[in-house]
Image: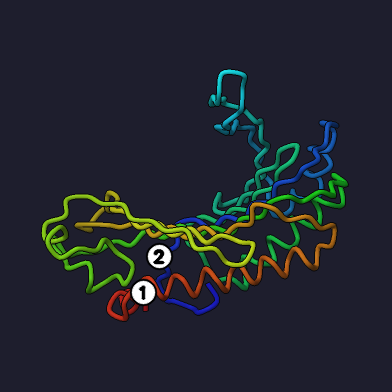
């Protein structure tokens, strides 16, 4: 994130662009590879499943849609792009360096993607940071570490597992915050996942400058939310 932490808890940063239109020519994957290969020399095909709710004559039913994706992966496997006929995702795995390093990767990948695919109808953008917070204590008081947490004095004395989440409307955008317990890494006693997902359901523009301005603002919103969710005591764990 923009405010530098010595040991940021981010295990994955994701920026996703989805389009109303899509490309049909499979040769485009080869053209993208030529542009991406210096930074992302490895490639891998994968499939992504989406669960959609559709209206039928009998009411509503769920349907699973499979999308084939092409992954372009850096030499160390920590940075990757995922490309489908109507989607571009830019991922950075742990160790996450900083926003000044991740943002140019997003901007460059989107510029190349738009130039080659000629897609124009951008309908959704999402910026997501998944944090894994490992602790060495066997027992803690959540209020010592989190401002955002399960509430209720009588219910929260002996929590075995939990998940708490909210969605906040930010004009036309949505910020989703989720905190839950998760298995700790080796040498730690407990861990929590703090997931911050900022997205817009509808976004239509063919101006990349407007698009990247949205991404910058989204990062500011996510960063502010992260520091609001944790206490000063927990923040010191990352210094």
Q: Residue at x 53, y 26 (%)?
A: 62
The crowd level at tag 2 (other Cα within 10 Å; few <14, some 14-19, many 20+) is many
| Vertical order, 118 against 173 (above or below) | above
Q: Residue at x 39, y 60 (%)?
A: 194
Q: CA distance from mark 2 to mark 1?
A: 7 Å
Q: Quadrant of the C terminus?
A: bottom left
Q: Earlier in the sequence, mark 2 or mark 1?
A: 2
The crowd level at tag 1 (other Cα within 10 Å; few <14, some 14-19, many 20+) is few
Q: Which residue is mark 2?
A: 9
Q: Quadrant of residue 232?
A: bottom left
Indicate the position of residue 28 as horizontal and vertical percent values: 83, 38
In the image shown, does 12 or 23 lie closer to the viewer? Answer: 23
Q: Residue at x 70, y 43 (%)?
A: 87
Numbered circles on residues, count: 2
In the image shown, does 212 or 52 lie closer to the viewer? Answer: 52
Left or right for 202, reference 178: right
Q: Quadrant of residue 112?
A: bottom right
Q: Which residue is mark 1?
A: 238
In the image shown, does 206 or 60 lie closer to the viewer? Answer: 60
Left or right for 155, reference 120: left
Q: Are marks 2 and 1 in contact (CB under 8 Å)?
A: yes
Indicate the position of residue 145 as horizontal and vertical percent values: 26, 71
Indicate the position of residue 110 as horizontal and vertical percent values: 76, 56
Give the secondary structure at mark 1. loop
Left or right for 101, reference 206: left
Give the secondary structure at mark 2. loop
Indicate the position of residue 120 as horizontal and vertical percent values: 85, 50
């Amino acid at each position: 994130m923009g405010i530098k932490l010595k040991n940021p808890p981010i295990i994955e940063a994701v920026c996703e662009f989805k389009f109303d239109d899509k490309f049909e020519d499979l040769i485009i994957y080869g053209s993208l590879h030529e542009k991406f290969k210096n930074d992302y020399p490895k490639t891998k095909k994968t499939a992504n499943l989406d669960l959609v709710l559709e209206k039928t004559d009998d009411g509503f039913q769920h349907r699973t849609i499979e999308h084939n994706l092409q992954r372009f992966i850096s030499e160390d496997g920590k940075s990757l792009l995922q490309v489908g006929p109507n989607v571009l995702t830019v991922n950075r795995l742990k160790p996450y360096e900083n926003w000044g390093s991740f943002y140019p990767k997003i901007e460059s990948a989107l510029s190349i993607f738009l130039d080659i695919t000629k897609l124009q109808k951008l309908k959704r953008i999402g910026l997501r940071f998944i944090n894994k917070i490992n602790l060495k204590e066997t027992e803690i008081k959540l209020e010592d570490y989190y401002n955002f947490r399960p509430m209720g004095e009588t219910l929260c004395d002996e929590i075995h597992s939990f998940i708490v989440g909210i969605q906040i409307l930010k004009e036309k955008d949505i910020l989703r915050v989720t905190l839950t317990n998760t298995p700790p890494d080796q040498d730690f006693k407990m861990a929590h996942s703090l997931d911050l997902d900022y997205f817009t359901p509808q976004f239509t523009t063919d101006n990349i400058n407007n698009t990247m301005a949205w991404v910058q603002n989204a990062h500011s919103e996510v960063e502010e939310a992260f520091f609001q969710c944790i206490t000063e005591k927990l923040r010191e764990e990352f210094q």
